[in-house]
Image (cartoon, rainbow, N blue to C red):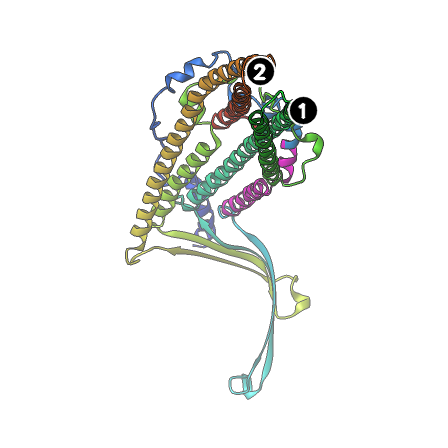
Amino acid sequence: MDRTRHTFPVVLLAAAAGLSGCTLAPKYERPPLPVTDAFPAEAAAVPAAAPAAKDVPWQEFFTDARLRSVIDLALANNRDLRVAALNVQKAQALYRIQRSELNPTVGVQATGERHRIPESIGKDGKASVSSTYTVGLGLASWELDLFGRLRSLKTRALEQYLATEEARRGAQTSLVAAVAGSWLSLAADEENLALSKGTLEAQGAACELIRKSREAGIASDLDLRQAESQVEAARASVAAYTGAAAVSRNALELLVGAKVPEELLPARLVAVTDPKGLSAGLPSDVLLRRPDILAAEHQLRGANANIGAARAAFFPRISLTAGLGTSSPDLDGLFKSGTRMWTFAPQIVSPLFASGSLFANLKVSKVDREIAVATYEKAIQAAFAEVSDALALRTTLVAQREAQDALVVALEETLRLSDARYKGGIDAYLPVLLAQQSLFGAQRAAVGVRFAEQANLVTLYKVLGGGV
């Protein structure tokens, strides 16, 4: 009988070890891709030998040294990215807390108690004072995870931690792309501002020349007024792009989270990447590696594991509380012979009636999984659309840039010929005015197209899950 009593705890521990790997969670199966097997035909124009975005660190993708320095500043100072990193640390700590539930908690406890026994119940009708001192090493209510409830909760916490880490990685990729886009926007504004200032200077010189010609009786009042209108239009453009550049700079510094040194600011648009470009690859290779989709899948895995915890709640819970120590009525006799004591208190709690809460909790966990599936599929569909849009614009923007550059060259020649005809007395000033307006508009449009082309490359890098 005594032997059985002493071996019972060992049997329980062995049973716990044997069943510790069991859970009641359903087997996880990744949902099929809710998109077609290939990107649209526009992707065929992407070079087959080009590297994949995920294999190209941003330091190699963004080739301008000033831009790389600005991105480094943003990664060090951006508050949103800092919050994302702190969320990862928080999720990691929560996972460790949940994982620790699987292991017993052992602690040392020392207690001292003194109480007075009144005369009414004392021996021989006399009051007395009783003392008890105890020191023990104990096991505090350790739940034997026979049905995998704690293990399922640990898995859910792990998946939430991994999802948070992917969210941080996605935040970093988004920040890099946003800083690059804002930096390019500022570069486009600065280039347009320089173009406007150059136009204002040229128009001012032409207007002064016509004014002198008017005073000499060669040019007409109409010619002078037309020239002055061009000067004022150029002055308005300078003011507009001065404000736009200031706004773009403020937006860039907000992303960076610090003042951007003057030497790191752009003066004109530059290429952001190697002309070899990037390879889109297949949807399954691209989309399933994006941080946002990986985060959605981890959330789905966590919801799947939570079903196991909800199922395990229907079964009994076995908890162990045990202690080993010494007890004595005198403080100086605590560690003498004959004071050894121990306790062992297993507890089994089994649900009998819970007013349907257990079934409702299981239903909630299953609905949460279906919500996670829908969220995962929506993330994939949104990613597929983003990549398709970026690929569709890629080749058309190249064609637009080439056509716009050719238009600028043609209008420069038109302006030269119109000016020569006016100075030769063949035509009035109006053809020169129209040529100047057309050229200035085409030059600004060329800047806009080149900016759109570079911004598209940044977007494509981001939506393809660019490397960090």
The verdict on residue 79 being magenta is: yes
- Of pointers 2 and 1, the one earlier in the residue sequence: 1
- Which element carries disc 1, helix, strand or loop? helix
Residue pointed to by mark 2: 422
Q: Which residues are magenta?
A: 71-99
> Is disc 1 surrounded by few (<14), some (14 to 19) or many (20+) residues within 10 Å?
few
Looking at this view, is 356 or 121 the one in front? 356
Q: Secondary structure at mark 2?
A: helix
Marks 2/1: CA–CA distance: 15 Å
How far across and how far down the image is residue 68, in percent? 64, 28
**Which one is nearer the viewer's eye here, 416 or 364?**
416
Q: Magenta span has 3?
A: no
Residue 212 - label: 1
| Crowd band around label 2 with a 10 angstrom C-alpha radius: few (<14), some (14–19), many (20+) | some
What amino acid does circle 1 point to? Lys
* Residue 280 visible in the snapshot: no
Residue 243 x, y percent position in the rendering: 60, 38
Q: Main secondary structure of the magenta part?
A: helix
- At x 54% / y 20%, what residue is drawn? 439
Q: Amino acid at mark 2?
A: Tyr
Q: Residue furthest front?
A: 217
Give the residue at x 36% y 51%. Answer: 316
> Where is residue 351 drawn, in percent x and y?
33, 55
Looking at the rendering, in which quadrant would you find the N terminus? bottom left
Q: Is residue 327 something one can see in this rendering?
A: yes
Q: Quadrant of residue 155?
A: top left
Q: Which mark is residue 455?
A: none
Query: On the picture, is 162 further left or further right than 384?
Result: right
Does 338 appear above or below 459?
below
In the rendered image, which quarter contains the C terminus? top right
Q: Nearer the viewer, mark 2 or mark 1?
A: 1
